[in-house]
Amino acid sequence: MAYFLHGSCWICGEEYEGLVFGGGFMNHTPIVPALDKETSKVVAVAYGETERYRYYTDPSMYESGDDIDMIQWNDLYLSAEQNYCPECEEFSMDFEVTGEGD
């Protein structure tokens, strides 16, 4: 099951629509939010080894703490809050689950 996400920064107000985290019944390669290093935009891409993207499942993309809510898909974890915002370059972007699907 995949989660549909909305990303928003509480400092600069930047919004990110159409994000996905997870995979469907037939597609076992997860789609994850990532920072495209060439465009500095947050996109949803297939999870894999590539130098072009910094995946938001990487702990360097969010500020960690004991009270941070996490979104889980199989063995991947995505912080629901305090993620890196490429617009203002602060750890101030939250991901909200807006729906689920296969």
Image (tube, rainbow, N blue to C red):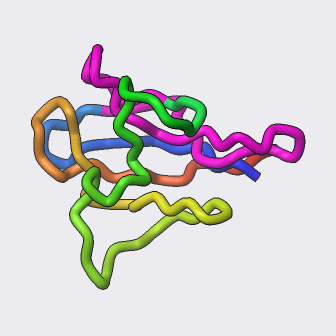
Corner quadrant of residue 37: top left
Quick one: which residue is furthest to the bottom in this view?
66
Quick one: which residue is furthest to the right in this view?
26
Image coordinates for residue 26, horizontal then vertical, percent = 88, 40
Image coordinates for residue 93, horizontal then vertical, percent = 27, 48
Looking at the image, which residue is at 54% across and 30% down? 45
Q: Is residue 84 above or below residue 41?
A: below
What are the residue bounds of the magenta stretch? 15-43
Looking at the image, which residue is at 11% across and 35% down? 88
Q: Is residue 101 above or below residue 17?
A: below
Image coordinates for residue 65, horizontal then vertical, percent = 25, 77
* Residue 38 part of the magenta-drawn span: yes
- Pick the residue in front: 27 or 1: 27
Image coordinates for residue 20, horizontal then vertical, percent = 58, 39
The mark tally for this picture is 0
* Residue 62 part of the magenta-drawn span: no
Looking at the image, which residue is at 40% across and 60% down? 80
Q: In the figure, is residue 87 to the left or right of 59?
A: left
Q: In the rendered view of the protein, which quadrant contains the C terminus?
A: top right
Looking at the image, which residue is at 17% across and 30% down? 87
- Pick the residue in front: 14 or 43: 43
